[in-house]
Image (cartoon, rainbow, N blue to C red):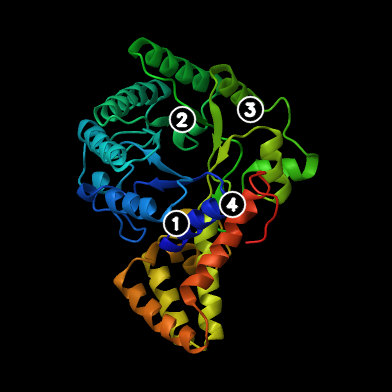
Amino acid sequence: MSLNCVDAAIEIANEHRVFLMLIASRRQIDSAEFGGGYVNNWTTEQFAEYVGEHDTGRFIVMARDHGGPWQNEVETRQGMNLERAMGASKRSFQADIEAGFDLIHIDPSQGSNGFPQPTTKEFTERTKELLAYCKMAAARSQREVAIEIGTDEGQIGTAPCVDIETMADEVVAFCQSEGFDAPEFLVIQTGTKVMETQNVGPLDRQVQQGGDVDGCSTLPRLMAIGDRFGFVTKEHNADYLSHPTLRWHVRRQIGAANAAPEFGVTETRTLLDLLRTAGARHLEERFLELAFASRKWEKWMLPGTAATDRDRAIIAGHYVFATPAFRDIHEEATRLCDGKAVNLRATLREAVKRAMMRFVQPFGMVQTIGV
C-alpha cells in the first residue's frame, strides 16, 4: 500500500524470521510499459530491486495479485479488446518473472470495453492460456514460479461450487497434459468483504457467534475442492477480521490470507494524529483535501453510508502518498516532527508493523505481539 508498508513487512519478516508475501496488484505496481503504479511510483523492476536490497534474510515472497486482462487501468483507458488485453497481461507477467517474482496470481475475471465478465468456461480457458505463458516464460528465464488460480471477485467469486471444481479440474488436467506443475494456491470466497473500514462479509459474524461456519454452507465444500487437488486454500480481504476469526483460520487450515487496506488506513490515521500533535492543522487539511479529491474512496463505500468527507479521505489516503502534492506535505511535516524529536517515517512504519502483527501472531507465525 505504501513504502512504509513494504518496509514494515520486510522488517517483520527478517526480525522474526518468518515468510511474508508482498502482493502487488497491477494498479499498485506494474512494469514500466504500463506506467508503474501508485505505490511509491515504482515499476515492477524498481520494486523488486528495492525488496532485494532490503530483504537481507530472503524472507519476502514476491507475489503478483490479480494479474490478468483489464486489471490495469491503462488497458481500460486505451479501449483494448480481449486479444490486446490478454497480450498486455502476458507482458506484465513477463516483467514479473524477469524481476524475480515468486508467485503469480492469474485472475482473468474482469470485463471491459464491451466485453462482459467471463463465464466460468471462459475464465478457465483464459486461466490455462495465461498459466501456460507464465510457465514457459519462467522456463526461458530459468526460474520457477508458483501459480495461484481462482478469484474472490466478479461472477467467478460467487460461482457455484460445482463450477469452481470443474474449473480446478480442467486446469489441473491441462497442467498434467502439458507437463506443468499444478497450481499451488486456490483462491476461494471464504465470506470476507472489505467495505469502508470494516469487514462486512458473513465469516467474522459466524465465527464470533458460533465459533465456526455452518458445516452445510458453501465454504466447507469450497475448501474440500482445494483438499482434493492438493491446493493451499488462499483467502483475500482478511482486513478488519477479529482476533478469534484470525485464529479460526489456523484451525480450519486456511493456508494464506491477503490483507492491505487496513494497513493503508492505519498509516493515514497515524499521520493525521502526528500532524495534529505537531500543531500542523494546515497540513492536516491539505492532506484531507488531497485524499478526498482523488475519489479513490468511491469503490469502498457502503450503500447508504453515513461516512463523512473526513472518513472518505482516510479511506483514500494511501492512494496519494506518492503524489508530488503529498511529498510537499510530507517534507514540511517531517521538519515539524523533527523539531519535536519525532521521526515521522519511523513512527508511521512502527504503526503499520503493529497493524501487521495483528495478523502474524494469530496465524501462529510468532509467539508475541511485541514489535
The answer to whether mark 3 and mark 1 are in CB contact below 8 A is no
Q: Amino acid at mark 1?
A: Val
The answer to whether mark 1 and mark 4 are in CB contact below 8 A is no
Q: Position of residue 49 (x, y in %)?
A: 32, 52
Residue designated by label 4: 16
- At label 3, counting other C-alpha atoms closer than 10 Å, the crowd grade (few under 14, some 14-19, many 20 or more) is some
- At label 4, counting other C-alpha atoms closer than 10 Å, the crowd grade (few under 14, some 14-19, many 20 or more) is few
Q: Amino acid at mark 4?
A: His
Q: Which of marks 2 and 4 precedes in the sequence?
A: 4
> Of the numbered discs in the image, which one, if any, rests on residue 6?
1
Q: Position of residue 116 (x, y in %)?
A: 34, 33
Residue designated by label 3: 218
Q: Position of residue 60 (x, y in %)?
A: 46, 46
Residue designated by label 2: 150
- At label 2, counting other C-alpha atoms closer than 10 Å, the crowd grade (few under 14, some 14-19, many 20 or more) is many
Give me the residue at 73% from left, 26% from top: 215
Give me the residue at 33% from left, 53% from top: 47
